[in-house]
Every structure is written in structure tokens, then in C-alpha cells.
Image (spheres, rainbow, N blue to C red):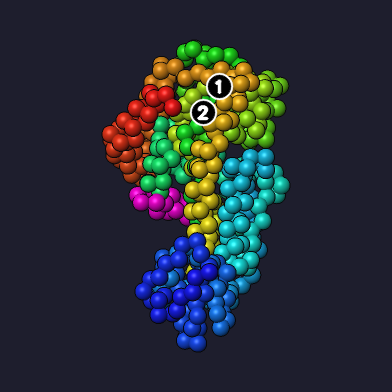
Amino acid sequence: MAEITTSQIGNGTTAYGSDIVVKDLDLDVSNRVKDDTPVLNMCMSKKRKVNSTLPLWTDDIYRAPAVQAQATIRWRLASSFPKSLDTIHGAADTFAKAVKAMSGGKFEISVHAAGEIMPAFGVVDGVQQGSVEMAHTAPYYFFGKDETFAFDCAIPFGLNCRQQNAWMFDGNGLKLTREFYANYNVVNFPLGNSGAQMGGWFRKEVKGLEDLKGLKFRVGGFGGKILEQLGVVPQNLPAGEIYQSLEKGTIDAAEWIGPYDDLKLGLYKVAKNYYYPAFWEGGAQLSLYVNSKAYQSLSSEYKAILDTAANYAHTHVMARYDARNPSALRELVANGVRLHRLPKPVMDAAFKVSQDYYAELSSKNPRWKKIYADFSNFRRDQNLWFRFSEMSFDNFMQSQKL
């Protein structure tokens, strides 16, 4: 255990991954942490122990007594996902645990799986009306209310995970989507990303555009609007209903996310043709919805805790998918799954349809037009940069035997 004095704190003394005891607290000095980051387990005493991996400063914020004086809060979070999916449902659990830890147990959030307190697709109404304080969902589920919802998740031929993060956190994405959500009494926070998804499970092979005609395909959100123009009959079903519908033949094909989640849902048992990529989900972002009145009622400390916890859980989701998808894919192939790339004519036709549809939306939906103008410019620049950086590196690495 390291010991430092208050004079050392003022010099920005850093202790990474260690316990710190501040020795001379007879002085009227409290540890404060830079960048509005909450401090865990701070207690005032003759010697104060601080669990910290961050620099300690004397001239910023967060005195322990102020954090400890916060009111006790109990909120509910409605998820659009079943408990069986420890990735995306688990993201809300990770978030809630982080909030509880950073608040010293004073801010507790109970997480409720899809259907427990409201349907999977009813969560935006629940938050808007104040039936629950929070929800965790894929915003493109609600494109029927307004296509603009999809920018907070994914649109066909949109951004990958890193690009979406860049647009949201360092571009205009978060600002523009929050302006949009103000119409629904919602404050949004990115809370997870799937990365590029797989294109789904098909009973029969898709060799060309003709094979899409009349195909009853469970497809998430906005992708259905594009595929519909190629002859597909899109079906919008929550995760818990996909397997049964595919097994009974109510639908002909279904997509969910990728190998790790799809293996858990057992989709390979009823359809063996597994296609890639999901051009409609190059990096599907999940979102935390907070009722705007409930959010404004929080202290600045609790708002900072909520923001920090959301950022942590957001990063955790993509890490989990990247770490677990490879072994899941191997297991699927070992169970007789056949991998297929979507035919280029299908991809080309879908791309053309999508660009025409976006232009049509821009001509009639001012909310869409405002965000799409910024989004499309950002996508153009990202595409240029990734051509020289990520794509060249990835293409080389994929050609190597490792």
C-alpha cells in the first residue's frame, strides 16, 4: 500500500492499480479527481483510503462528502433483449453494476428483460411516458415512428463500429441525435455495438436476386425497408421469437447478430446456410434511453456517474463480441453450418436502392435530412481514411497464415 501526503497530491501524483493512504488529513484538503471522474470508496478519516487508478489533483472536483451526501435513488431499466444473451442484455447489467459501485450503492438500477415489465418494442414509449426511467434497446426498431431513429443504431451501408464511435463522440452524432430525441422526452447514451454483423440464416441458398422474391425474412430495423424493394417480405420479430418462427416455417430466413449470440439462440439447428455480411448493420449501436425529466432531476455527480458507466459498458460490449465470436463460429461450422458470402449482384442492387431511398427520405423528412447530411459527409471522409489505413492492413493480415 502506497502512502502519499497532501502536498504530493497537488503535484498530480499517480498511483496505478494501488491502494493509497493520504497521511496528513489534519489539513482541510479533499482528494479531487480530474475530468469529472467519480471516486470509488472514499471515506473521511485520519487516514483516508482511496481505490484509484487515476491521477489525484487538488484543483478540480469531487469531494467525497459531496458524493456521500447524494440521495438514494432506485430506477428501473427495461431491456429489449432476453436474459439468455449475456452480450447485449448483459450490457445493461454491466452499466447498472458500475453505477451502483461508483455511487457507493446509493444509485441502484434494476434491469428487466424484454417482456418482464413491457414488450421489447414498447420501451421507447415506456421511457417517453415515464413508465420507466430507462431503457436499453436498438433504436432502429422504431423506424416506423420516424426513420431518423436508425442513425442512433445503423442504416444499410452506414458506418462500422469505430466510425460510429467517432461520429457519436467526436463528430456531431451525439449532439444531433439528442436534438432529435428531445421530441420524445429521451436523453440517449451509446451503450454497446455489435460490430459488423452476419447476414443471417437461410433454409435455401441465395444465389442471386431471384432467390429473394417472396422470401419471408426476419431482419432488424431499417434493413427490411431496403430488402423489401428487392422482393423480400421483411418480418420484425424480437430475439425470443426467432427460433420458434424459423422452426415452424412461419419465416424462411432470419438474422440476429453474429456467431456468439446466434449459437445461443440455436438458429443453426433449423437453417444451415449462414450468410455474410449484413450490409444493413455494419456496426449496430445499442442505446441507453433515459427519460429527460428523470435525467434533469439528477445531481451533476449522478449525471457524471451515469455517463461514465455508459461509456464503460459501451466499450465492454464490442470487446466481448470480438473475443467470443471466433470460437462460436468454429463451433457452428463443426455443427454442419455452411458459410456463404452474399452474391455481389445482391449487394450492388441493395446499395443502389438504399441511396435512392435516402434521397427520397431527405426530400420529405426534415429530421432525417438534417442528420443524414452530416452523417453522409462523415461517412465519405471515414471511407477515404479507412481505405489507406484499416483496409490495407486488414487485407494483408487476412492473406497470411497465422
Above-or-below relation of 378 to 249: below
Instruction: Say if residue 289 shows up in the picture.
Output: yes
Mark 2 belongs to which amino acid? Met
Which x, y percent locates residue 231? 51, 19
Residue 124: in magenta span: no
Whether residues under marks 2 and 1 lie with C-beta atoms below 8 angstroms apart, the answer is: yes
Number of numbered labels in the structure image:
2
Q: Nearer the viewer, residue 19 or 236?
A: 19
SS assignment at label 1: strand
Query: Which residue is depicted at the point 61% across and 26% down?
Result: 331
Query: Which residue is depicted at the point 64% across and 58% down?
Result: 109
For disc 2, the marked residue is 198
Q: CA distance from mark 2 to mark 1?
A: 8 Å
Query: Which residue is depicted at the point 61% across and 21% down?
Result: 334
Q: Which residues are magenta?
A: 169-185
Mark 1 belongs to which amino acid? Tyr
Q: Nearer the viewer, residue 331 or 203?
A: 331
Above-or-below relation of 225 to 72: above
Q: Quadrant where the C terminus lies?
A: top left
Which x, y percent locates residue 196? 47, 33
**Numbered label attached to residue 379:** none
Query: Which residue is depicted at the point 47% across and 19% down?
Result: 341
Instruction: Say if residue 130 shows up in the picture.
Output: no
Q: Residues within 10 Å of mark 1 (few under 14, many from 20)?
A: many
- Upstream in the sequence, badge 2 or badge 1? 2
For disc 1, the marked residue is 274
Which x, y percent locates residue 361? 40, 36
Q: Residues within 10 Å of mark 2 (few under 14, many from 20)?
A: many
Question: Is residue 29 found left or right of 388 in the rendered image?
Answer: right
